[in-house]
Image (cartoon, rainbow, N blue to C red):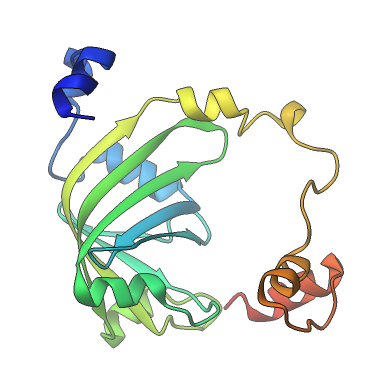
Amino acid sequence: MTEDRLREIYGEVSPRAAVKVIDHLDHHCRAFIAASPFLVLATSDGERMDASPKGDPAGFVIVEDDHHLILPDRPGNNRIDGLLNLIRNPAVALIFMIPTVDETLRVNGRAEISEDEALRERCAINGRLPKTVLRIRVDEVFSHCGKAPLRGGLWKPETWPEERPVATLYEIVRDHGQVEVPSTEQSVIDELYAKTLY
């Protein structure tokens, strides 16, 4: 496949889409980020890629100025795949989401990992500071139309399954890793989540 062939298939970019990219965080971007409780962060070490979900109360990503964001890193499983990627390659891409809003906001930029206490204190929740934060230099920002969430019924409760449609986390870990787990009950996992969110 070539770029020319793709253009034959898809045609030229629409005029509005061609001009929607900006290089800073304007009032629309700031409002979207302030209302967003969830994003997906993409990183790469130059060969493999990772996409990691990040979530906290709305506004957890701090807009430092027109060109910088602060993203806290909360407790997880300590794989730190994304952080290890950033040591080798600082490029990042973020997709911000807001429940009930079909459009999303994409930010492309470059990140550095910081242990700065003042930055970490700005991201404290329940008195708990993140171990590190990402300070992200914004290169590109643009909105995505809502077609994908609309097609997927993401914010339409009538399309949601009545019961969990997949195995629990511990069932999956048990089967993928061939290891013993404390329980496969969702209630046990929910208790663990409650104890280790921050």
Q: Number of marks in the image?
A: 0
Residue 118 in the image, given as x and y percentages of width and height: 28, 82
Q: What is the quadrant of residue 173 in the picture? A: bottom right
Residue 192 in the image, given as x and y percentages of width and height: 73, 78
Of the pair 59 and 161, the residue shown nearer to us = 161
Q: What is the quadrant of residue 82 in the picture? A: bottom left
- At 50% from the left edge and 32% from the top edge, which residue is drawn? 101
- In the rendered view, would you say 65 is above or below 86? above
Residue 73 in the image, given as x and y percentages of width and height: 42, 73
Q: What is the quadrant of residue 10 in the picture? A: top left
- On screen, residue 121 versus residue 188, left or right, reads left
- In the rendered view, would you say 70 is above or below 12? below
- At 57% from the left edge and 33% from the top edge, which residue is drawn? 100
- In the rendered view, would you say 25 is above or below 6? below
- At 38% from the left edge and 46% from the top edge, which residue is drawn? 95
Spot the residue most to the front: 1
Quadrant position of the C terminus in the picture: bottom right
- At 83% from the left edge and 74% from the top edge, which residue is drawn? 188
- On screen, residue 21 versus residue 60, left or right, reads left
Residue 117 in the image, given as x and y percentages of width and height: 30, 87
